[in-house]
Amino acid sequence: MKLCRFNDNRLGLVQGDQVLDVTSALEALPAYRYPLPRTDQLIEHLDMLKPRIVEAAKSAKSLPLSQVSFLPPVANPGKVVAAPVNYKAHLEESRADVEINHNRQVIEIQTIGLFLKSTSSIVGASEGVTITFDDRRNDHEIELVAIIGKPARNVSKEDALNYVAGYCIGLDMTIRGPEERSLRKSLDTFTVLGPWMVTADEFGEPSGQQMVLTVNNEPRQNANTKDLIMSVRDLISWGSTFYTLQPGDILMTGTPEGVNRVVRGDTIHATIDKIGAMSVKVK
C-alpha cells in the first residue's frame, strides 16, 4: 500500500499513475482534546485504518499524480533521528573533502552516534528546498527513511523491522560549515520526505535497495542500502536504547557517497527501489 498526503491535507492511496482520495477513512480516528498525543495518529492507527482505506478506494475520486501537490507522508512526527556517515565510501569522501569536514575529524557512526533534526525542517516533495545562505555550500543527501509504527524501546535487531510502519525517500539537506550537524541540517525545508509512504508489508526487506540521485539530470549519487555500515535493523535497535521511538518518528538511515552542492534553480530527482521517485525544486 502506497499512502500519500496531498493538496489540502488529503489522504491518498497511490495506484499506478493515479491518487485515490481516501480521506474519508480518517473519520475512524479517535477524537482528541488538549493535551494532544505526541504521536502521529495516522501511523499509530494504521493497521485499523487499512481496511477502511481499501473500502474507501472503491468509490474514491481519482486524480493523476501529475496534478497533485505532495505533502510529507507523516503529518506529526515527534522526532527525526538521523544516522551520520553511515556508508563507508561517504565516510572516506567526508574525510578527504575539507569543504565537508572543515578541518575536523570525521568520526565513525559507531563512535559519534545518532543525531536529531528539527521536525520544523520537514516538507513534502512538492514544497521544495529553500536556500537561505547562498554564500555557503548547500548539499543534497539522498536517504532511505524508515517510519516507526509503534513504540520501540530496547528492541532486538532480530525484531526491529516489526516496528516499522513504512518507508519513503528522504533528502537530508545540509549547509557545510563548522557548526553542529543538527543546526546545519535543521533549516526550514531541509528534510524532504516523500513522495509517499510504502507500507512495510509491501516494501519488504530494506537491505539491497538501489538509490539514485541526479541534479538537473546530472548523476550525483548511486548506491545500494546493502552497503550501510549500520543496517536499518541496527539503527532501530541501537536508537531504541537511547530513547523510545514512537509512532510517526522518522529514521533517516544515512547517505552514500556523491554529496555535492545545489543552488537556486536546480531540480533534484531522487529514486529508491520499491518506492518510486520524487522531483524537488531548489528555490
Image (cartoon, helix red, strand yellow):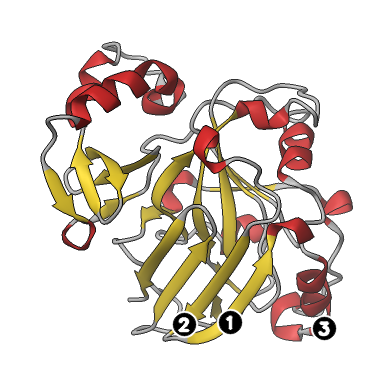
Label 3: few (<14), some or many (≥20) within 10 Å?
few
Q: Is residue 219 above or below residue 52?
A: below
Front in this rendered view, residue 121 or 56? 56
Residue under pointer 3: 96
Asked if disc 2 and disc 3 are in contact, CB closer than 8 Å, the reply is no
Residue lying at 66% horizontally and 79% vertically, measured from the top left: 258
Residue pictured at 47% horizontal, 45% vertical = 119
Dot 1 crowding, Cα within 10 Å, few <14, some 14–19, many 20+ = some
x then y, percent, for residue 149: 53, 27
Q: Nearer the viewer, mark 2 or mark 3?
A: 2
Question: What residue is disc 2 on?
Answer: 215
Residue 127: % across, % down: 30, 61
Q: Earlier in the sequence, mark 2 or mark 1?
A: 2
Q: Which amino acid does label 1 sit on?
A: Arg
Mark toward the start of the polypeptide (3 vs 1): 3
Disc 1 target residue: 220
Quadrant assignment, res 93: bottom right
Q: What element carries label 3?
A: helix
> Above or below — where is 1 with respect to 271?
above
In this view, the residue in front, 202 or 69, is 202
Task: Say what amino acid the circle numbered 2 marks.
Answer: Val
**Image quarter of the C terminus:** bottom left
Residue 251 is situated, as x and y percent measured from the top left of the image, at 60, 43
Gap in Å between the C-alphas at discs 2 and 3? 22 Å
Give SS at disc 2: strand
For discs 3 and 1, the disc positioned in front in the rendered view: 1
> Label 2 vs label 1: CA separation?
7 Å
Q: Is mark 1 on a helix, strand or loop?
A: strand
